[in-house]
Amino acid sequence: MEAVTNIGSLLFFPGGLFVIVAGLLYEWFDHKLIARLQNRLGPRWFQSFADALKLLAKEEVVPAGISRWAFVGLPVVALAGALTSALYVPMAGIEPAFSFSGDLIVTVYMLSLLTLCTGLAGATSGNRFGLVGATRTLTQLFAYEAPFMLALLGPALVAGSWQISEIVAYTADHHWLLLLQPIGFLVAMIGLMGKLEMPPFDSPEAETEIVAGALTEYSGRGLAIFHIGRSVELVIGLTLIASFYLGGVDNLLHFLLKTGGLLALLAGLQSVLARLRIDQTVGLWWRYGALLVLLQWLILYAVKLA
């Protein structure tokens, strides 16, 4: 009976199916908010589900002259990495399915699989636009990954642990680290936008320049799985930031309010900011994002010694 319960929690709630559904709903909420802020009607609540189901049902066209295994397998690996990272995160205020010392580092690297697979998919697709998009994707990865990880390690240093469950237990005890580490919170939010290639950091998939970037050759199931993986990573990233900086997510209501509030903030930023060039997104953020977090670490360490 215990095995059946564990399998159900991994597959349905708070496991894979729940995270996928939540990701598609959050994607719709993001698009709806942006549309309303731009005085448009926006999509209906089921639009994300309809798009995903339609793509999953369509034929997947594999370009000639490339590795079929890589082309078909990379989206699956990307989604698997995102779903695996959800095992260590307190989804919907429920204890993580698995927890061990240092699982924060594993989670951050699992979240990087989506970007790595997207870059490899574009590089091996045999399309010139895909190659340009892949180059931008991997370049942006190096610019945003380090600041994002450093921003998540700030709460870990204060809590004295690299285990997500222990950090969440510390912040849930009325520790809003947003007040103590505002720079880390800002860097984490911008880093998440960069990882997910949200405007204004969407130059890797700029439609007006390079069609669809690294995913230009993708259609059908492959494109759907990449989009689902990005939606899943959005939920997990928002959950981590809310858990670390906004006093934890100890129940479903807090989970919805805090992650929804962060998503509304992201939607507002997307609607008012224009796309940046790849040199602007990489050059500025790589130089100053990580340095700002390290400066905050020094300040915290000096205060602790005092």
Image (cartoon, rainbow, N blue to C red):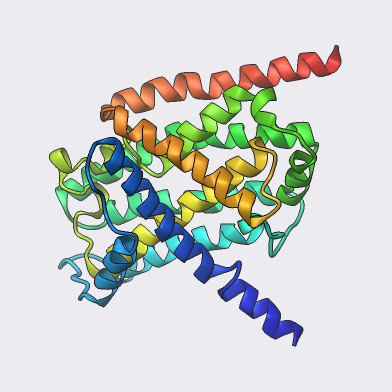
Q: Quadrant of residue 35?
A: top left
Instruction: Give coordinates of residue 38: x percent, y percent.
Output: 25, 36
Quarter the C terminus occupies: top right
Is residue 229 toward the left or the right of residue 182 in the image?
left
Q: Quadrant of residue 156?
A: top right
Question: Which residue appears at 29% of the width and 46% of the height?
Answer: 134
Which residue in the rendered view is the most extreme toward the bottom? 1
Give the vertical position of 269 relative to 74 (above or below): above
Is residue 102 toward the left or the right of residue 39 in the image?
right
Q: Nearer the viewer, residue 83 or 17?
A: 17
Give the vertical position of 73 relative to 285 (above or below): below
Instruction: Give coordinates of residue 239: x percent, y percent.
Output: 58, 48
Instruction: Give coordinates of residue 244: x percent, y percent.
Output: 66, 39
Is residue 88 toward the left or the right of residue 280 in the image?
right
Question: Which residue appears at 78% of the width and 36% of the height?
Answer: 159
Quarter the N terminus occupies: bottom right
**How many badges with numbers are in the image?**
0
Is residue 87 toward the left or the right of residue 56 in the image?
right
The reply to whether residue 199 is in sight is yes
Question: Which residue appears at 44% of the width and 39% of the height?
Answer: 264
Question: Which residue appears at 30% of the width and 28% of the height?
Answer: 272
Instruction: Give coordinates of residue 61: x percent, y percent.
Output: 18, 70
The reply to whether residue 71 is in sight is no
